[in-house]
Amino acid sequence: MKSFFAIGCMLYTIFGFGFHATESNAFDPFWMRFLVSSIGFTVVILSQISQFFKRNFLMSLFLTMLVYNAHFYFLLYMNDFHPNYKLSLLVVMITTILFINNPKSYLWYSILNLCTYEFVLLMSDNFDKDAMLLGMMILLVLIFGYLKNREIEYAFERLKKREEQINDVNNNVYYGIFRIDMESRLLYANEQLVKMLGYSISEDRMVISELRSVLQSSSEISRMMQNNQAIHDYEVQLQRRDGSDFWGQLSLRPVYNDKHKLECYDGTLIDITSRKKAETELMLFSAAIDHTSTGVIITDKNGGISYCNPYFMKLTGYAAKEMMGKRLEDFGVKDDNSNLHMWTKLVSGLVWKGDLNFYTKAGQIITELTSVAPIRNDKGQIMNFVIVTEDITDRKKAELELLHAKEQAETTTKAKQQFLSTMSHELRTPMNSVIGITNLLLEENPRPEQIENLNILKYSATQLLGTINDILDLSKIEAGKLELHEDNFDLHYLLINTKRTHSINAKKKNLSLSLKVDEILPNILRGDQLRLSQILNNLVGNAVKFTEKGEVKIQVNTKRESLEDVNLQIKISDTGIGISKEQMERIFDSFSQASSDTSRKYGGTGLGLAITKKLVEMMGGTIALESQIGRGSTFTIDLTLKKGSKAFKAEKVAEVGEFSQLHGIKILLVDDNKINQKVASKFLSKWNTIVELADSGQEALEKLKNNSFDIILMDIQMPEMNGYEATQAIRKLADKEKSNIPVIALTAAALSEEKEAAFQSGMNDYVSKPFAPAELYSKLAKYTSPNFGSTKETIKLS
Ligand code: ADP
């Protein structure tokens, strides 16, 4: 096409110029004709080969036309100054300017130039018909050429656009598209495939060899290709350029040419690595669910079962088809409230956890710890429920059995407690009598040979009572029933008393018993004085008991003192028989003694240290033991006690006979036990008091109503109306004088809660049975003294 135009333009230049030139007789220099034609010709040729005008021959045409017009004008001017030359000149100038501004419309400028030429020619005086026709022909050729060219350009553009579209589509798909020749060499690869194989898009795709090596190495693919067969969705493991593996899904389709000869293969490759991974994970999950010892059930949004794992089927005995579509409740125990609760919670989108009871196919009830969770779709709508169950039938059974056992044990413990309480009372009452009567006999000037016997009797009875108290204490501690009572007490006084209690025995064995108390130790502390004294008495008692010669030391140090409390260290050390390492490990266990020899030689039950340790721990302290066989033992108690009120003053137990204020006071002694009555009244009479006896609470009330007394000694455990009830009735009497009468409890059990109850019922104080005469005397003196009313609220001596 280009050459077609080029030749046309060339002819026109030569001939056109020739016509005009011959018209002019006046001016016909040959060289001029030749020069101008050559210029036109040169421009055409140059435009054809010029890089700038590449594929743009119309542009060259325009330039040619421009030259023609210019040359035409020149001719007219040179010949006879035809008046239309100005028009030619004008058009040349305008189209030149237009071309400079918008080179793309060169075609129109060319046509304009040509038309001007024709017009000028027409208007000229020397109208030449042939030249005109030739011009017209060229114009037609130009228009035809233009139209043809446009058509070709459009077709070319459409093709280009289509190619671009195909490329775009090919490159925008998520999978690789490629074409390979019969030797599996890559002929075409879209961007996705290039990237998939680890190359960059700008690289030459022909260097990609990974696909080829896979196709060639797979015998199945090679075989199918040899048989000209298509391959669909073939899963294959490939390698990227960097050596990393990925899974691809390959499809190949043979491509035939017009002559039905196989030319190449078109293929697609999809990266299915994540799908493969998900499939593997799914497979593992599925295997895990199939083999787990937990029931897994999946239901639709309405609760209809759509999956059930083998474990749950085995557990319930149902086959999968028997379960599908049914609801979980269909297998559940009907009156199980959990079901209702479960669905209410699930519908509101929450996870439910709880126990569910199911019937197995065989009719047995199984208990499952069940958790049900709703599964939602992207829009948040509940689509399924996943149910996980753990079989707790055996555990529940065991729990139930344990509960029964516990209840039974509690009942037994209660019965044991009751038994111990009754027994202790039954044992204490006669023991009190024995000790009381012995005390009495000792007071009644016995003969010297009787004194020793009476002392042995008193010692044995006291020991027996101690043992009874220990057994009772231990059973209380073990049942968690023992409570500590916090009150103000004087530690120094308590320590002195402890030393005094044991000094008689120490003296008998020729042992030195010393007490050393840190000077900075505050006197008044808060705690359970009774129990602390029990601890100290046990340790000091043991130290004296298990030491034949040497000394027993009681040392108390202040380790730390703050505004509120004080940290004490109480050490009780002796130079006695000592305890071996093995024995030390179990010495604090109940009923544990160092050896059978020890028990034979020293007696004891092995309860003291067990009680001591438990009491110390209840007080928040610790007890430690250091000992060496034959060299002695040291028990160290570490204890923190609150500081007490400085205003508190411990009451000094009066020595009997120190006061004579009991003389003539009227005492109502209430006790259902005749021996107790006898023992107590003997002492009371000795102190010149007037004693009136009452056998029960009821009788005491009657007697109080009809007589006047200074004080009442009230036993607690009595039939019909016990001591508490009687005291409460007394406190309610209308006569103020009688209702305010001091009441001292005579408690046989010596249990702390009995003492507590005594105070609560309105009693003023208590004395433990068997009473120490001095203590009883002291308390009677205290409550019958004229200034009792002013002190009774502040003094409470345990
Ligand atoms: P009991 O003294 O009534 O047997 P304990 O619980 O108080 O019971 O003591 C248990 C045992 O620990 C004693 O039998 C004795 O063997 C040993 N024991 C306790 N204190 C000492 C001590 N200070 N020195 C040597 N042995 C001791």
Image (tube, grey):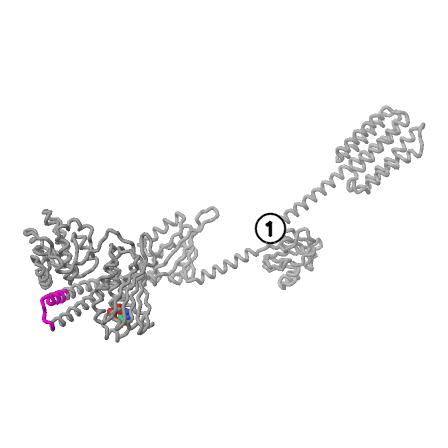
Against 133, residue 409 (above or below) is below
Asked whether 35 or 16 is in front, the reply is: 35
Residue at position x 90%, y 25% in the image: 80
| Residue 37 in picture, x, y percent from top left | 88, 35
What main secondary structure does the magenta stretch of the protein show? helix
Asked where in the image residue 319 lies, by quadrant, the reply is bottom left
Name the kind of residue labelled 1 in the image.
Answer: Tyr
| Residue 13 in picture, x, y percent from top left | 86, 35
Quadrant in the picture for the C terminus: bottom left
Q: Is residue 135 visible?
A: yes
Residue at position x 23%, y 69% in the image: 506
Q: Is residue 672 left or right of 539 when viewed as pictured?
A: left
Asked where in the image residue 401 lies, by quadrant, the reply is bottom left
Asked whether 709 or 354 is in front, the reply is: 709
Q: Is residue 729 visible?
A: no
The stretch in magenta equals 432-448
Q: Is residue 626 on the magenta stretch?
A: no
| Residue 680 in picture, x, y percent from top left | 11, 61
**Which quarter holds ligand 1?**
bottom left
Q: Is residue 18 left or right of 360 when viewed as pictured?
A: right
| Residue 788 in picture, x, y percent from top left | 15, 51
Asked where in the image residue 296 lies, by quadrant, the reply is bottom left
